[in-house]
Amino acid sequence: MTVLALDIGATKFAAGIVHAGRQVRDVRQAGVPEAKVWEVCRELLLEVAGDTPITAIGIGSAGPVDVRSGITAPLNIPEWKSGFPIVASVQELFPSAVIRFAIDGACLALAEHHIGDLRGVRDGLAMTVSSGIGGGIIIDGRVAVGRTGNAGHIGHIVVPGWDEPCGCGGVGCVEAVASGMSSVRWARAQGWDGTTGVELSRAAQAGDAIALAALERAGTALGQAISSAAALLDIDRVVIGGGFAESGAPLWDPMRAAIAKHARLGFLRDLRVLKSRITNGATLVGAGVLAAGHATADEYD
């Protein structure tokens, strides 16, 4: 049995072969182009598979998605924003493979629940804070799916105090305020001359005033969103991964301060927010778990 995992992100594709049900190796990546997106994804999959017959494939995709119809419509991939039949397209490449498909947040939650800091936790939230913001929910020991497969889309919780337009068409979503891409845009509008979230994080850690302000607003918005989600879901554990989450104290201190300010209900007194210890592509790991049969397409248990 050879299992392949695919992660469709906002800026890159990643694919690899799943070993022992949980480890993804032979990982290769490709940037998401402005045009001919499927062609790049297709070549990556064929390159990773090589001559080996593929028996199962797990796909984790940035959303929104429609799991039942196998459609992905990532907000940050313009060519696919109106919907792309990813499951049918991959099935055409690998006709005999079983394909399981989920939003990237559900894969993230699967990874954290199987090998990360949500292991053994019955109710929790896994988040990624990177180019965008996504999440997956564990309720009663299972990943919440939702009507269309988009449960856990925490990036579109509306946070008070900001009215930035979001790629979803709304305003004030936490992704529009606190993602790496959004924070870079805000910082550049204030006169900062960097171009990436990594540069912004480094500048903040070096004491740059604009970069520090950008991460303070991002951390505050994240704390507000987490507080709302925790109260709604009655959870006591949040695990956060993603490149922008590696920004350290300039991001985490205002986030924790906002949580302390807003998560005041008695049942939230034990709420813990942790940085993910999965350093090698948690969404890809979760897609591997999904593909290897540790979860069903309906329940992700």
Image (tube, rainbow, N blue to C red):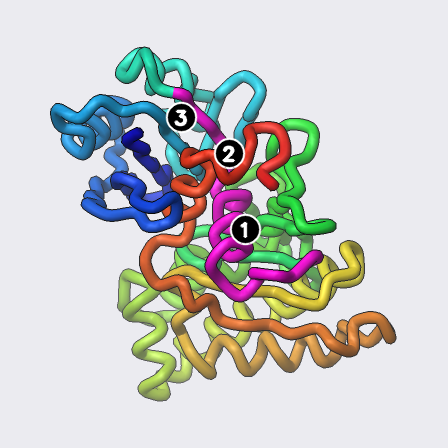
Magenta residues (range): 98-123
Residue 256 position within the rendered picture, expressed as x and y whole percent measured from the top left: 61, 79
Q: Earlier in the sequence, mark 3 or mark 2?
A: 3
Question: Which amino acid lies under the numbered mark 1 shown in the image of this protein?
Answer: Ala
Which residue in the protein does label 3 denote? 80
In this view, the residue in front, 3 or 286, is 3
Which residue in the protein does label 2 denote? 102
Residue 260 position within the rendered picture, expressed as x and y whole percent measured from the top left: 71, 80
Measure the alpha-carbon separation of dots 3 and 1. 24 Å
- Picture disc at residue 27: none
Q: Is residue 263 visible?
A: yes
Which residue sits at x=40%, y=33%?
58
Q: Secondary structure at mark 3?
A: helix
Question: Which amino acid lies under the numbered mark 2 shown in the image of this protein?
Answer: Ala
Question: Which amino acid lies under the numbered mark 3 shown in the image of this protein?
Answer: Trp
Measure the alpha-carbon separation of dots 3 and 2. 16 Å
Which residue in the protein does label 1 denote? 109
Q: Secondary structure at mark 1?
A: helix
Query: Are the residues at dot 2 and dot 1 in contact (C-beta closer than 8 Å)?
Result: no
Residue 19 position within the rendered picture, expressed as x and y whole percent measured from the top left: 30, 44
Q: Earlier in the sequence, mark 3 or mark 1?
A: 3
In this view, the residue in front, 154 or 276, is 276
Q: Specify the quadrant of the image occupied by residue 42.
A: top left
- In the picture, which quadrant includes the N terminus? top left
Residue 282 position within the rendered picture, expressed as x and y whole percent measured from the top left: 41, 53
Q: Secondary structure at mark 2?
A: strand
**Vertical comparison of 134 with 268: above or below:** above
In this view, the residue in front, 200 or 72, is 72
In this view, the residue in front, 22 or 92, is 22
